[in-house]
Amino acid sequence: RVAALFKGRQLEKLTERERDTYGWPQMILGDRAHSAAKIDDDRDLYRKAAEHFAIATKIRVTEADALYNWGNVLFDLSRAVRDGALEVMTRAAEALLHRAVVKYRAALVIDPQFSDAHNNLANALADLARAEYPRNDNGILREAFGHYEAALRHTRTPDVVHNNFAKALHDLARITDDLALFKKSMGHFQAAGAANPNYYSVYLSWGHALADLARRTGAAKTYKAAFEKYRRAAEIEPTGTATHHSWYYTMLEFAKKLKGKEKAAYLKQAAAVSAEQKRRRRNRERRISRSEGAK
């Protein structure tokens, strides 16, 4: 009876208790569909998850959480439609991000201290900002910064928020060449690393930010700091190759600025990093081959 009334949108015929009792199962079903959609890259499951969360938004006790989760579905779908090329913003992805922003904002109207909604709204805005340049200068990213700051006041996962904030600051610093923004991003990377010393994304992104700063200032100490962050990222994620790729090319770039024995030493280090990257790639290809052969 309850399900039928919900489906027919005849909510006035339900008691408050019936609504509450039905809301949480809808949240669970939505979460399951969303998780499966991400694993299988199944667009129908994304839509199914959104349907469950849409129902849960009609119930007082689950409304804010449902809006937040609905926003997450739209955000993840916006990434899925880019087919792994997250840096390439398509019209479909941009439209989904705008819809996600609407859901996050609605959740925050209900619960202004909802730290995860602040964080994910900021993530969506930061993603949209990449699509807006050069049409829009930096207003979207600056709005994102405000939501990261709000998230930090209430979050239980400061490492995640600091890392996201740092990456958004780095984005704007790279676009504006504002060294003060680079410096501010380093502070948030440092805070993220202090909160979680084994957070791979922190050290990889921190290395990228330091490398970008070094290209602007030419400071040897900044290049060397980038190498140390890449080194730490490689320790945390021993099977990955992305770190070694960036580490190798940044080291080559630095070596070109040097002369004599120091240049030779860094070229030798770069060659070792490249060899390690190739070894890891071969190992990964073997694992994939064995996995496919076992099917």
Image (cartoon, grey):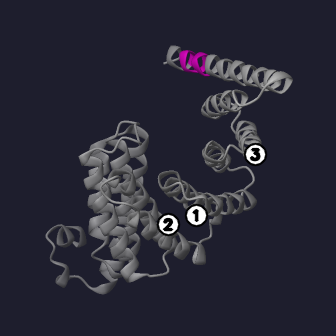
Q: Is residue 232 depicted above or below 30 in this figure?
A: above
Amino acid on which the number 1 mark rests in the picture: Val
Quarter occupied by the N terminus: bottom left
Q: Residue at x 45, y 59 (%)?
A: 123
Q: Is residue 21 visible?
A: no
Rendering coords of residue 268 (x, y %): 79, 20
Q: Which mark is residue 119?
A: 2
Tell me the SS state at disc 2: helix
Q: Which residue is mark 3?
A: 225
Rendering coords of residue 171 (x, y %): 50, 53
Could you tell whether 287 is left or right of 263 in the image?
A: left
Viewer-side label of 3, 1: 3
Label 3 crowding class (10 Å Cα cut-off): few <14, some 14-19, many 20+?
Answer: some
Q: Which residue is mark 1?
A: 161
Amino acid on which the number 2 mark rests in the picture: Asn
Rendering coords of residue 134 (x, y %): 34, 52
Name of the residue lying farthest toward the front: 259
